[in-house]
Image (cartoon, rainbow, N blue to C red):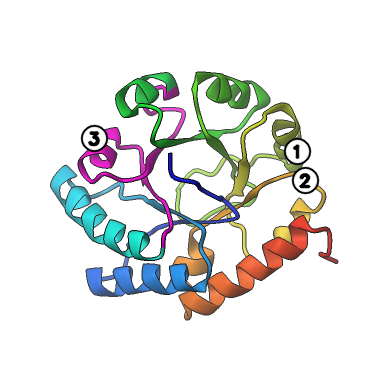
C-alpha cells in the first residue's frame, strides 16, 4: 500500500471549470502542499470519469500524492488509482477490500462512533468525518458536532480527517481534537490561487495540530 498522509486532503470539484483549468488547479494545489487527493465526479459517465482519472493520476504520480477515487471501485481499479473513498450509501468497506485487496487505500465517511468503529473493523484505512460546517458541495448538509468528531478520533486507531466547510478562517474549532488532518473542497478549488490556498492551509493545519493555533 502506498503511504498516505491526510494532513491536507483535497476533494475535487470540477463544476464551472473546463478540463484544462481543472487539471491546472489540481496541479497548483499539489505544488502548494496537498498531501492526499480525491477525485469526486458525481455527474460524469463511467467513461468520462475513467478518462479524467487517468489524467489526474499522471499529475498525482508526478507529485507523489496518492489518488483516491470517490465511490467507484471500478474506476479505481481501471485507472490503477491508489484507493477509493466510500460513503454510507456505497458498497460496504469489507466488499471493497475483497475487490481491491490489501494494497489499496480505503477511506470511509462516518458520522457516529458506531459507524467509525464498524468501518475500521471492516478494513478502512482512514475516516472522513463531518460535515463540521455547512458546505456548498452538497445540497443537504448534516452537521457533525466537534464533540462527536473528538469521540470518533479517540475510539479508532486509524487516521481521521475532518471535513465540511473548513477553511483557514474556521479550523481553530478543531483545536485539541486529535485529527490527522482536514479535507477541503471549496477552500482550494474555488480559491483565486490554489497554490497559495494549499500552502497557507497546510501551514495553519500544522500549527493547529502542534497546539500553536490561537
Q: Name the element at disc 1.
A: helix
The location of residue 23, given as percent across then percent down, is 30, 69
Tell me which label, 1 or 2, sits earlier in the chain.
1
The location of residue 5, given as percent across then percent down, is 56, 50
The location of residue 114, given as percent across then percent down, is 63, 20
- Please report contact status of discs 1 and 2: CB closer than 8 Å, yes or no: yes
Q: Residue at x 22, y 50 (%)?
A: 49
Looking at the picture, tell me which residue is in the foreground, 151 or 33. Answer: 33
Q: What residue did someone put label 2 on?
A: 177
Numbered label tally: 3
Q: What residue did someone put label 3 on?
A: 74
Which labelled disc corresponds to residue 150?
A: 1
Residue 92 versus residue 169 in the image, above or below: above
Q: Name the element at disc 2.
A: loop
Within 10 angstroms of label 3, few (less than 14), some, or many (20 or more) residues? some
Within 10 angstroms of label 1, few (less than 14), some, or many (20 or more) residues? some
Tell me which label, 2 or 3, sits earlier in the chain.
3
Estimate the spatial distance between the alpha carbons at disc 1 and disc 2, rounded to whole Å. 5 Å
Labels 1, 3: front one: 3
Q: Would residue 103 be found to the left or right of residue 162 on screen?
A: left
Q: Name the element at disc 3.
A: helix
The region drawn magenta spans 64-93
Q: Would residue 122 be found to the left or right of residue 57 on screen?
A: right
Q: Is residue 169 visible?
A: no
Q: Would residue 4 be found to the left or right of residue 179 on screen?
A: left
Amino acid at each position: 500500500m502506498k503511504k498516505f498522509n491526510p494532513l491536507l486532503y483535497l476533494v475535487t470539484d470540477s463544476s464551472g471549470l473546463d478540463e484544462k483549468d481543472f487539471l491546472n488547479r489540481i496541479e497548483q494545489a499539489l505544488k502548494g502542499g496537498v498531501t492526499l487527493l480525491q477525485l469526486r465526479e458525481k455527474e460524469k459517465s463511467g467513461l468520462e470519469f475513467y478518462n479524467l482519472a487517468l489524467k489526474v493520476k499522471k499529475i498525482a504520480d508526478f507529485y507523489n500524492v496518492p489518488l483516491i477515487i470517490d465511490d467507484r471501485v471500478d474506476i479505481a481499479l481501471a485507472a490503477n488509482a491508489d484507493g477509493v473513498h466510500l460513503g454510507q450509501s456505497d458498497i460496504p468497506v469489507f466488499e471493497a477490500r475483497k475487490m481491491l485487496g490489501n494494497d489499496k487505500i480505503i477511506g470511509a465517511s462516518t458520522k457516529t462512533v458506531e459507524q467509525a468503529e464498524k468501518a475500521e473493523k471492516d478494513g478502512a484505512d482512514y475516516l472522513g468525518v463531518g460535515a463540521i460546517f455547512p458546505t456548498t458541495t452538497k445540497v443537504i448538509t448534516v452537521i457533525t458536532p466537534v464533540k462527536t468528531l473528538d469521540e470518533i478520533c479517540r475510539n479508532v486507531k486509524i487516521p481521521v480527517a475532518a471535513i465540511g466547510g473548513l477553511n483557514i478562517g474556521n479550523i481553530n474549532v478543531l483545536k485539541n481534537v486529535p485529527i490527522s488532518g482536514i479535507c477541503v473542497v471549496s477552500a482550494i478549488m474555488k480559491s483565486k490561487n490554489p497554490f497559495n490556498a494549499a500552502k497557507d492551509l497546510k501551514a495553519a493545519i500544522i500549527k493547529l495540530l502542534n497546539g500553536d493555533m490561537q
